[in-house]
């Protein structure tokens, strides 16, 4: 098993770099890629940058250059489901794009994806459920959606009506789609920085570091479980 971990921002990746043993780093396509030992397991770690294009580019690079066959996306997200509290962990069961007409762009156009909804790997989700029993943060499981914007109250209702997601971010769906196309196992782990009750970019800025570290902690439990 070759495990890759992808984070979107420097804040999200920093807790992983701090815990990475025997690290060595190479630079490809403007991106630093770390190889080392995390949670007792050899991993490849990269900070892809914000947005779906960066996420797809870096995930494909890890698959092609490093032979990654299992990819974990770790970082932060906005909470959409009313049950979520700040700093909860959400593990993806599915990922989709909230800013794309999935039928027109994915299903009815080459290369003809069977769906615009990309399921997380069942074995990884099962391992995450087992790891949740040891987690210090509440862990929830549900749908994630991604788009190229930070979501506030003006957009929240429409996304909920169309997708009913637990969390929203800017990368997970692109990572999930890339992994699906390559036959690579995928799951996303996100710490919640803002909710309907704690809305706005200001809350994201305040809570980003703590939520990133919570996601890192749970990813360590997950990797220990699947190793």
Image: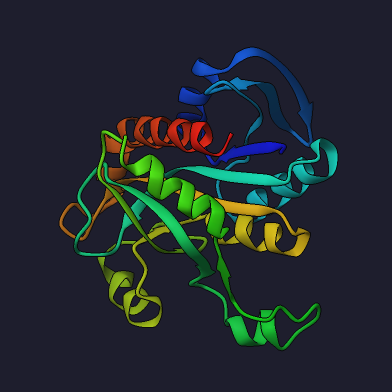
Say which quarter of the image contains residue 167.
bottom left
Q: Is residue 146 visible?
A: no
Q: Is residue 128 left or right of residue 122?
A: left
Q: Position of residue 23 (x, y in %)?
A: 66, 14
Q: Is residue 109 left or right of residue 128?
A: right
Residue lying at the far left in this picture: please name it.
197
Q: Is residue 29 visible?
A: yes
Q: Position of residue 102 (x, y in %)?
A: 59, 81
Q: Position of residue 164 (x, y in %)?
A: 35, 75
In-front residue for pair 220/204? 220
**Residue 41 to residue 135: above or below:** above
Q: Residue at x 56, y 20 (%)?
A: 40
In-front residue for pair 3/105? 3
**Residue 146 to residue 46: above or below:** below
- Tell me the quadrant of the picture where the N terminus can be found: top right
Q: Position of residue 67 (x, y in %)?
A: 81, 40
**Residue 109 to residue 71: above or below:** below
**Residue 10 to residue 59: above or below:** above
Q: Residue at x 84, y 38 (%)?
A: 65
Residue lying at the far top in this picture: please name it.
22
Q: Is residue 2 left or right of residue 218?
A: right
């Amino acid at each position: 098993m070759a495990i890759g971990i992808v984070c979107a921002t420097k804040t999200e990746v920093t807790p992983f770099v701090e815990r990475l043993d025997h690290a060595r780093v190479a630079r490809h396509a403007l991106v630093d890629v770390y190889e080392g030992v995390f949670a007792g397991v050899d991993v490849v770690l990269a900070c892809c940058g914000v947005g779906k294009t960066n996420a797809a580019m870096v995930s494909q690079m890890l698959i092609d250059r490093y032979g990654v066959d299992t990819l974990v996306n770790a970082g932060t997200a906005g909470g959409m489901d009313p049950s979520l509290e700040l700093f909860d962990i959400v593990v993806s069961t599915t990922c989709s794009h909230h800013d794309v007409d999935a039928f027109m762009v994915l299903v009815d156009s080459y290369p003809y994806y069977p769906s615009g909804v990309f399921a997380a790997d069942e074995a990884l989700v099962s391992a995450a459920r087992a790891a949740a029993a040891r987690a210090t943060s509440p862990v929830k499981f549900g749908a994630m959606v991604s788009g190229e914007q930070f979501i506030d109250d003006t957009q929240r209702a429409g996304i909920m009506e169309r997708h009913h997601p637990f969390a929203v971010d800017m990368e997970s769906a692109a990572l999930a789609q890339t992994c699906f196309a390559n036959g690579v196992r995928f799951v996303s782990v996100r710490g919640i920085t803002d909710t309907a009750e704690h809305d706005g970019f200001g809350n994201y800025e305040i809570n980003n570091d703590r939520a990133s570290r919570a996601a890192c902690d749970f990813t360590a439990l997950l990797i220990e479980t699947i190793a």
